[in-house]
Amino acid sequence: MKNEFEVGLSDRKAVYILFPQSIPNKATIDKREERPCKAACMYACPINTNVLGYVKLIAQGKYKEAYQMNRDINPLPSACGRVCYAPCEKNCNRGQLEDPIAIRELKMFVADQVNIDELPIPQITKTGKKVAVIGAGPGGLAAANDLALKGHDVTIFEAQPEAGGMLRYAIPEYRLPKKILEQEINYIKRLGVEIKTGVEVGKDIALANIRKDCQAIFIGVGAPGGMKLEGEGADQPGVTDGIKFLQAVNLGRKVEIGKKVAVVGGGNTAIDCARTVKRLGAEEVRLVYRRTRAEMPAAAEEIEAMEKEGIKTDYLTLPKRFFSKNGTLSEMECIKMQLGEPDASGRRRPVPIAGSEFKVSVDTVIAALGQVTQVEFLKEMGVNLAKNGTVPIDPNTGVTNIEGIFAGGDVVTGAAYVIDAISAGKKAAISIDRYLKGDPIEVLREDKKPEKLDEKEVAVLKQRFPSENRVHMKELPVAERVTNFKEVALGFSPEQAVKEAIRCLAGQIEGCIECEECKRRCEALAVDYTQKEEKVEINVGSIILSPGYQVYDATGKPEFGYGRFPNVIGALEFERILSASGPFGGHVVRPSDHKEPKRIAFIQCIGSRDHERDYCSSFCCMFATKEAIIAKEHLGKDLQCDIFFMDMRAFSKGFDEYYERAKQLGINYIRSRPASIEEVPGSRNLTVKYLIEDDKKASREYDMVILSIGTQPPKEADRIAKIFGIELNEHHFCKTSPFHPVESKRSGIYLAGAFTQPKDIPETVMEASGAASKVLSLLKEARGSLIVKEDFPEERNVLGEEPRVGVFVCNCGSNIAGFVNVPEIAEYAKTLPNVVYVGNNLYTCSNDTQDNIKEKIKEHNLNRVVVSACTPRTHEPLFRNTVRKAGLNPYLFEMANIRDQCSWVHMNEREKGTQKAKDLVRMAVAKARLLEPLEMMTVPVNKAALVIGSGLSGMTSALELADQGFEVYLVEKEKELGGYLKQIHYLIDGTKTNNELKSLAARVKENKNIHLFTQAKIEKVDGFIGNFKTKITMNGTSKEFEHGTVIVATGSKEYKPKEYLYGADERVLTQLELEQKLAQGGGLAKGVKNVVMIQCVGSRDEERPYCSRLCCNEAVKNALKIKELSPETNVYVLYRDVRTYGFKESYYTQARQKGIVFIRYEKDQKPEVVKTKNGLKVNVFDQTLGIPVTMNSDLVVLSAGVVPNEDNKTIGQYLKVPLNKDGFFLEAHMKLRPIDFATDGVFLAGMAHFPKAVEESIAQSQAASSRAATVLSKDSIELEGIISKVVDANCDGCAFCIDPCPYRGITLIEYMSKDAIKKTVEVNEVLCKGCGTCMATCPKKGIFVGGFKLEQISAQVNAALGVEA
Amino acid sequence: MNDNFEPLIIGFCCNWCAYSGADLAGVSRLQYPTSLRIIRVMCSGMVHPNLVIDALQKGVDGVLVGG
């Protein structure tokens, strides 16, 4: 199946883990539809062979895997592929439509594809238990195989000179070549099974003696005795037993037969005898059978093969008497039969017809009438025997009446089939293993019967799956085979096998075919096939919709060849190719030939900014730039990367700098929208055709082209809108409004992410937290009502106790146990000092093991716990919790990482890996012995917030928090509320901002939870998360208050230009000033014919390298306003890139339609504003036309950039939070934590972070409130115990540690001690993050980190080296 | 130095980066020699120089500080 995570670049199985770091990191089974058949084959097989599974693997050409799947359950697949009676085929559901699948032939085919002698032997951990198996037939071999794999020492005792039982001695060479059987037996021997041949138990060795040596015995001696022919003269030498005859032939002994041979019987053995006799050269061979062909127990294909070979059968015939001449057999007298009433077997009983006797001339008669057991030797041990000589057992377990003795196969059932014996051997092996482990033997088995399709289903399936004839295997021609013992079956060719395998109905569907292989293999029993879709009703107070977006289907632009040319791929595909965990393991190659590309083109705006999708997808420019940089990192600087683009939209924080860096790295930006891509025949290279700026045609050849494919609303948008009763906008994204960015049109339903507009990660994260804030306000009454608190018992004081360490070694299923020797590690752990208990667990993280750990802590009075398993980074919290629940301090716990850092990275070095794992356990124990309980401090939370700044963001944050029920101190340095937004009068969509702003300010002033301080200055902020104390001054008076969190919303302001005659000529304005005129001055003065707007004034230059994000939108907004007020006025916009991202793109389109002229200039050819007698003149070099242009201008409007608040630096120092080099506050993570600071409890909102639009500021402010609420909603905060502690006696106050502390958490103090001043340092436990830099700088061991003391780390080093301290 | 020489290396790895990196190597099933014994620290900044010197003196063949 296509791997969706790899964007279809690779395949995955129906059971899969989405990607290595996915959360949860669990497997999913992808079931797409019901399996068309009932998998009757699998249930018909006595050992439930996974027929669907291996047939599907053959269909996919995975022959080795198909063999392995067979071998894993059946130790004799080659033999079964030849001689099995194939109940699977008889039950095959396709067989109800037409011919069944040739399952047995397919098994033979896969078995013939592997060289059994070269198959690797799995790692087996020995148990030291001994088992004897009596009889090396299929049952005994199967039992021995499975027991050996479980680690037991198995010895098989076989009376015959060779192993194989009936497979070797009853089945002729032409059906099962001895060589093949030997290979399979040899493999079993390679598993460690010893086979003692020529040893007859009861004669050469007594069973009781074996019992003394072995803990368990399996009896699988079969039924090797032939039933005697009755009748006068039947005891003469010419009359022989079929089994003995075949045995002699198979042993290679010389067998005397006459010219005329009669074989009596109707089973497979009889036919084997007849065909063997023919091959030995008898002139006339006949089969004599007392019923008709219909009642013959032999397999139909065997009867047919015999008939083809010219052997006739006398049906309804019974031999009665045998006559000899000169001491040799000469004739037999037979009687004709007729069928009477059915007998016990259900077949009609043959009844002799009186007087129908006749004589036949024969030299040899072979009787193949059935088999009997030979079990005299069992009597000495008192094993019960049935009247017919079979051994009665419990059919589910193989248990006999004597403890430790198990039985199965023909010795129990009388003569049956190979696969039945194998099944019996396997069942007994399970029981024996359980018996040896001391587990109860009774196991519940799910024996499902094969099901048939009903008539209706057959009819439907016949419609769906056209008839396909069964592929017939080639056989040796009759003439060539009757003279020798060559194998008759010639097997499938690979083409035939695949063709036949594809016929399987189960394999025809996509997704899980329910072969249940995963269920059989899952040791944790986590796979449940009975799970069904459930409908669940949940009562909720609010809903957040974040269904994301969908990638545009680029096949809709056929001119670019996506989906047609293999080397044209989307940016997401390329992202996966660049990834180390991607489809090519991080090797950057193109799909067609997996060669490294030398020339890559990126084409922007595929499915964005066109007629149907008049919006910008916002992130593709940076995405392409990033991919180009990484591609160069992978393939070297000589890689040619060309990016075809229209406008470089690097409008977010740090983006323009990144863009500049890309150019420096040699990434070539070509400003053109290519017309088409053509594939170069032969090389599969690609020619990109495009126009250069003066409309000349050009083309370039590339090895690979990446399309920056844009976004679309999610496929389900319309359905979602209908279900939730919300509105969509004209682009079918969800509709919102600028002042309510996370609110849908239905109250209580909130929105986050790309569902409302294409956007980058930080904006998505902001909206997500913003939506959470709206929900928090709405549901404030219900806060905490669904939380379950965990109770811990009182902590046991272990100080002064000798360490008592418990070690729990995890198998992690086979993740650890498959590659290192876990029992050996566990045994080793027992030898380590202070270790008093060692557990060995299948999954240490499972619930029952957690309970077990708690029990063992109590039972053995453990005071240190070591879990030797996976990584503490994911599992330490779980185990700490467990030990805490058992009354131990959670820090008395240590992990040894023997999975992620051992078994998984040394998969082919079992011994060395085991050694390393032992070392890791020893190191962990060494540390654990020295562990001390650590205290987890709790600090109470002051449930109030400080919001700095009362612009749009500050007011929004304050109101959100107040609505959630928290107290807010809102501090504003100006007299009035409103900040930057006061100067904005309308938004691009026409929203009047004044009304919104007024209502916000009024709500702030009215809200009882908000304490507003205007004209106030912050003097000091002390404290830390949960406990801040701030001092402010207002008009000379000062005030102090306490609070638990801080939201920084200090805003930004417009740059005051120094260029373009600003300030020197009143006809040069900024956009804000123009807007003021347009909104309040009633429009432009009469006679203003030409307006020239200049973009990027004070942005994207040396001094301020960042893009101010707002100005393009503001210019388009004001230009449209001018056109609205005065359509005849000409408006020219001089720009570098038009950055109308998202839905603002449509206003840019509108502006061009309305005749607003956009002229592009370059950074190093900036426009010139000249004052002349007649007014202002603007000169600019038009890059598109390639000519200089001069415009008379009545008004020059400067799109002045946004500059940060000059107070940011001081405030940053008060709060210990950083600024970036442009003077904006620096968040904890640019993408994932855009609202948080690295300092806990302080959050960021609005233009203090970076210039942004109204809706973006609001979303971030709401987000800051919900982030703050995560602190304020708690009564107290539990702090990490792993922090620094001062050893006052050792500290001499040298203060080396103070400056290196990255959290400024250490202060020097002095106090009086013994009449002298003692200097020492003090750690602020709240600020300390336990990094231990202080510990490494201290020359006196005067400060250490709890849980990572020097002695503890040193103990690990010593243990690694195996030395004493 | 003979060809069979197998060094013993102690790695002090920062919980947040190098140690996570070693875990990721495991998740990605990258195979490397068994010579390394990683000791988890909460920051490479806590690795006191004495720990490194001490380890070398006691006979470790190499020390890796990852952070």
Image (cartoon, rainbow, N blue to C red):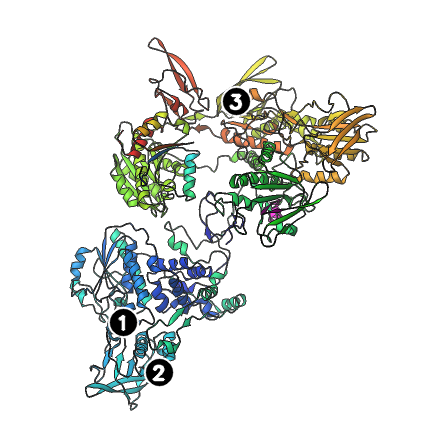
Towards the viewer: A16 or B51: B51
Pointer 1: what residue? A250
In the rendered image, which quarter is residue A749 located in? top right
Q: Is residue A525 visible?
A: yes
Circle 1 packing at 10 Å, graded few (<14), some (14-19), many (20+), is: some
Q: Are both tags, 1 and 2, on one chain?
A: yes
Q: In this view of the protein, which residue sits in the foreground, A911 or A43?
A: A911
Secondary-structure class at tag 2: strand
A144 to the left or right of A790: left
Query: Which residue in the structure is indicated by mark 3?
Result: A1215
Q: Bounds of the magenta span?
A: A701-724
Q: Do the residues indicated by labels 1 and 3 lie within the same chain of the protein?
A: yes
Q: Residues within 10 Å of mark 2 (few under 14, many from 20)?
A: some
Q: Nearer the viewer, mark 1 or mark 2?
A: 1
Is A119 a magenta residue?
A: no
- The three-letter code of the residue at mark 3 reads Leu
- Screen quadrant of the C terminus of chain A: top left
Mark before the other along the chain sequence, 1 or 3: 1
**Is the residue under label 2 in contact with that under label 3 (CB below 8 Å)?**
no
Mark 1 to mark 3 CA distance (whole Å): 93 Å
